[in-house]
């Protein structure tokens, strides 16, 4: 599915591009693509920071800041180069803004939970659009190009589908069933460590992490 009859909304195909195996293959077989490998490496770390069920919040902040500083340094390099422009030699302005927001919003959420809800674990993967994407994935099974009118008509069938056999499938079975679309992980609690997810770095810890991320 990654080559023939490509589904441009297949999340798993995108996730594989950030895997260690793919990055190793890219570096070994395409030496000129080292910059691409770095880009995928830092973004993959950012995505892991949002999705990991067991990672400490300090490590999440480190990965988010590494990606943030990488993007900022890359942009500064483009701006300083006399023959480069952001329009031709950089990611889109929208992507740049979104990635920076993803980096900083993760850190903001961690500090908000630390200061306002210290007794509750912070589960960053639930602060996402995945539940909505789940609905879209199921709707695409019913009709690939659905409209708002179709959505309203499908509501009873959608509810029955979500509460019926689909809800009893394993995560992998659900992923395969909706392969022509989204890959939903928000309900996956495998390997979750609630104790770790309720431990908070102090402002001093975050400052030290920021210095380390900038050096990395």
Image (cartoon, grey):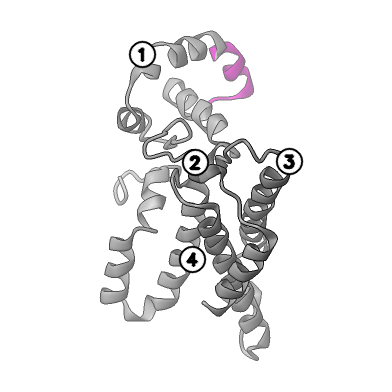
The disc at residue 165 is: 1
Nearer the observer, disc 1 or disc 4? Answer: 4
Q: Position of residue 73 (x, y in %)?
A: 61, 78
Report the residue at 37% width, 45% height from top: 12
Cα distance between the residues tagged 2 and 4: 27 Å
Magenta segment, prevailing SS (helix, strand or loop): helix
Residue drawn at the location 67% of the way across and 43% of the way down: 113
- Give the residue at mark 2: 195
- Give left or right: position of 79 versus 31: right
Indicate which disc, 3 or 4, sits on the residue closer to the N terminus.
Answer: 4
**Distance CA(mark 3)–CA(mark 2):** 17 Å
Residue beneath disc 4: 42
- Which residues, given as a range, are shown in magenta? 146-154
Query: Closer to the N terminus: mark 1 or mark 4?
Result: 4
User: What's the distance in space between the residues labelled 1 and 2, CA to CA?
Assistant: 33 Å
Question: Looking at the rendered structure, which numbered label has been put on residue 116?
Answer: 3
How crowded pointer 3 is (Cα within 10 Å; few <14, some 14-19, many 20+) is rated as few
SS of the residue under disc 1 = helix
Q: Bin the neighbour count of mark 2 within 10 Å (Cα to Cα): few under 14, some 14-19, many 20 and up.
A: few
């Amino acid at each position: 599915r990654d080559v023939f009859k490509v589904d441009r909304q297949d999340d798993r195909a995108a996730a594989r591009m950030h895997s260690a195996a793919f990055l190793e293959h890219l570096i070994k077989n395409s030496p000129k693509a080292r910059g691409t490998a770095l880009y995928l490496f830092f973004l993959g770390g950012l995505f892991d920071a949002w999705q990991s069920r067991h990672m400490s919040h300090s490590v999440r902040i480190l990965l988010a800041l590494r990606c943030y500083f990488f993007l900022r340094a890359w942009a500064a390099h483009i701006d300083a180069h006399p023959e480069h422009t952001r329009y031709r030699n950089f990611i889109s302005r929208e992507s740049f803004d979104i990635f920076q927001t993803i980096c900083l919003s993760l850190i903001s959420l961690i500090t908000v939970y630390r200061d306002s809800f210290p007794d509750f674990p912070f589960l960053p993967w639930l602060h996402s659009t995945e539940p909505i994407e789940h609905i879209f994935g199921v709707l695409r099974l019913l009709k690939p190009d659905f409209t708002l009118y179709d959505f309203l008509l499908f509501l009873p069938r959608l509810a029955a589908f979500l509460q019926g056999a689909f809800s009893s499938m394993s995560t992998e079975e659900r992923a395969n069933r909706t392969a022509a679309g989204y890959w939903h992980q928000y309900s996956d609690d495998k390997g979750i460590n609630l104790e770790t997810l309720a431990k908070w770095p102090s402002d001093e810890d975050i400052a030290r992490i920021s210095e380390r991320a900038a050096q990395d």
